[in-house]
Image (tube, grey):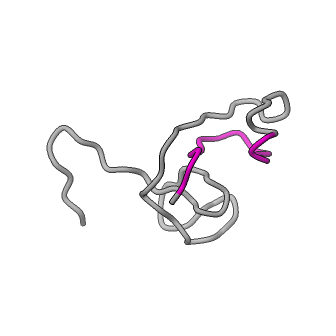
Amino acid sequence: MESVPAGRKKQPNVCRECHRVVEGEACALCGTSNLSTDWTGYLVIIDPEHSEIAQKMNIKLAGRYALKVR
């Protein structure tokens, strides 16, 4: 297990395929295990049907997403 310096939280994993913030070792949305901790921009989509940002990012489900994943 990685140690994290005091006062700093561990960066959550993000799916490189769909940009969803992931709990665990694989993405529950698309099923891939291609995850990254190198990402920027945090986006919470509550109502994807009425969100212009969700439509531009092709997000169909509510949830937490990263804007840029490396």
**Above or below 15: residue 62:** above
Q: Nearer the viewer, residue 53 or 22?
A: 53
Residue 70, horizontal then vertical, whole percent: 51, 60
| Magenta residue check for 66 | yes
Tell me the magenta residue range.
56-69
**Above or below 6: residue 49:** above
Residue 22, horizontal then vertical, whole percent: 53, 55
Q: At 51% across and 65% down in the image, what residue appears?
A: 35
Residue 18 appears in which quarter of the rendering?
bottom right
Residue 43, horizontal then vertical, whole percent: 59, 36
Residue 54 appears in which quarter of the rendering?
top right
Q: Is residue 44 left or right of residue 59?
A: left
Q: Is residue 23 left or right of residue 4?
A: right
Q: Nearer the viewer, residue 53 or 32?
A: 53
Image quarter of the N terminus: bottom left
Q: At 59% across and 44% down in the image, what residue appears?
A: 67
Q: Is residue 20 left or right of residue 36?
A: right
